[in-house]
Image: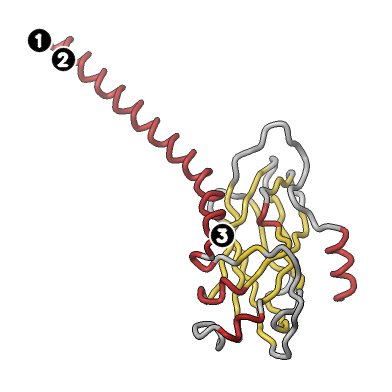
Amino acid sequence: MTNDAQRDALQGRHRAVALWCAGVVVAMIAAAYASVPLYRMFCEVTGFDGTPRVATKPSEKVLDRAVTIRFDANVAPGLPWSFAPERTTTKVKIGENALAFFRATNTSDHPVWGMATFNVFPEQVAPFFNKLQCFCFTEQLLKPGESVEMPVSFFVDPQITTDKDAYWVDTITLSYTFYPAAPKSGVAGKVGNPATPEAVQRKGQAG
């Protein structure tokens, strides 16, 4: 084989490797976008990894015992948002239907989709931390510079007091992390789950 033929063959192999690597990167990005909602759905159903449950109705029983709820907010690399709770802690009675607010702001010059994952610590209380309404249930779209108030409605199930691993807990941390989300076609300039009128009314009553 001549030197030119060897060089052409080597360049061909290099191009093939480059194309293969590019394909792997694209597949990894696609998997990253898909894995967040799939992982979230799995955790919501099972309570795995400190994920709170989704409730279909408010608690009907309120105990005299109270617990402290801490709110933690994070933004993953690559998402040009600021994100923080309006209050870092609150005290609620077990079984009491409570409402908390977070604020997110798009600090970039272009529209950005985001999606939140969530966890409860310590993990053994996750099956007893129930959400009725949450911005984390849907992807969020923020326009450049847009800021939005995001509510979460929740309660701590009174059954926690009968659980041998969780009955002693008096402080619960609810933690959110927003990640970049894939843009949705045909949707523009609309936030996925802003504060509902009912949530705003409840906030005014609480204030």
Q: Quadrant of the C terminus?
A: bottom right
The percent coordinates of residue 39 (x first, y second) are: 51, 53
Dot 2 surroundings within 10 Å: few (below 14), some, or many (20 or more)? Answer: few
Q: Amino acid at mark 2?
A: Gln
The percent coordinates of residue 138 (x first, y second) are: 68, 50
Whole-angstrom CA distance, mark 1 to mark 3, is 62 Å
Whole-angstrom CA distance, mark 2 to mark 3, is 57 Å
Q: Which residue is mark 1?
A: 1
The percent coordinates of residue 202 (x first, y second) are: 86, 69
Whether residues under marks 1 and 2 lie with C-beta atoms below 8 angstroms apart, the answer is yes
Q: Amino acid at mark 1?
A: Met
Q: Which residue is mark 3?
A: 45
Q: Nearer the viewer, residue 65 or 148?
A: 65
Instruction: Examine the rendered structure and indicate whether residue 23 appears above or below residue 205.
Output: above
Quarter of the image holding residue 7?
Answer: top left
Dot 1 surroundings within 10 Å: few (below 14), some, or many (20 or more)? Answer: few
Q: Which residue is mark 2?
A: 6
Please tell me whether mark 1 or mark 3 is closer to you in this view. Answer: 3
The percent coordinates of residue 44 (x first, y second) are: 57, 60
Instruction: Examine the rendered structure and indicate whether residue 173 appears above or below residue 43.
Output: below
Is residue 16 toward the left or the right of residue 51 in the image?
left
Instruction: Examine the rendered structure and indicate whether residue 64 appears above or below residue 25.
Output: below
